Amino acid sequence: MRSVFLCLSLGILAGCATVSVVPGEATYEGALTKSQSQLRQASNAYCDEIVAEGWVEEADGFTTLADTLMNGKASAPGAAGFYATKIGANSKAPALVLGLIAVDSRAARNGLAGVTEEARAVLKSGDMNASNRGDVVSFERALVRAQMAHRGFQEALDLVSVRADMDVAPIAAEIESFAGMIDDARVIADRLADRYVGEGVAGS
């Protein structure tokens, strides 16, 4: 994913976001618009929610998150991952497990939709410096955690489907809807990253 690598690179360019050395002149970091502040807050809150709800494990940092997104997380053959274990995908009543997956996937999708709307608002703004490094990284982190949550939901569904003597198509459709929301958010994240690289870093 292009924006993952862009944002990892942006993390190295720590000094480029603040370009002003003249007293009184606004810097990129200091010239945050209302939409930018809301995007960063919404992104951070979404990351916190995903961990607090137990949809993913708390990661050590963004590099760990990005590595998990790109390469997956190794686990013993046949072993359930964090989310599947938490909800008992291999052991609890299938109806209960399926209900939990549906509720959690819907909540994760709705949360990401709200964050993505904040990102769209930044893109629509007339401020050419709108893609602040911190906003780009925060949104990217939220997107990576969403992808991790989606993988957990899908794994749990795969595991319980083996035991469930019932139609799991509605749950699969819910998870697929979440995947579509992630794809939409990825496009926005790439556009934000491109805008920061093109407008912000060029001026550093």
Image (spheres, rainbow, N blue to C red):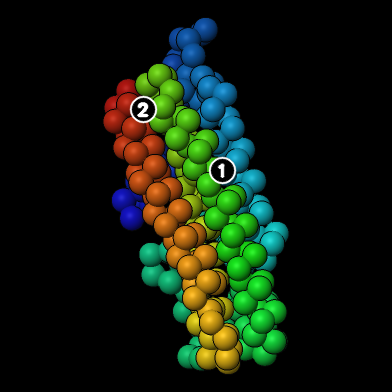
Q: Pick whichever, 13 or 3, lies toward us.
A: 3
144 or 188, which lies in front?
188
In the rendering, which numbered label is found on residue 200?
A: 2
Q: Position of residue 41 (x, y in %)?
A: 61, 38
Residue 138 relative to residue 70: left or right:
right
Q: Looking at the picture, which amino acid does disc 1 mark? A: Gly
Q: Is residue 163 visible?
A: yes
Q: Quadrant of residue 43?
A: top right
In the rendered structure, find residue 83 and report the number of the disc placed on it.
none
User: What residue would you read off at disc 1?
Assistant: 114
- Answer few, some or many: residues within 10 Å of disc 1's Cα (few below 14, many 20 plus, some between 14 and 19): some
Q: How far from the left and from the top, in percent, is residue 189?
A: 40, 44
Taking 87 as reference, is 203 above or below it?
Answer: above
Which residue: 63% across, 64% down? 104
Residue farthest to the top?
24
Which residue lies at the image location 51% right of the left edge and 19% below the top edge?
31
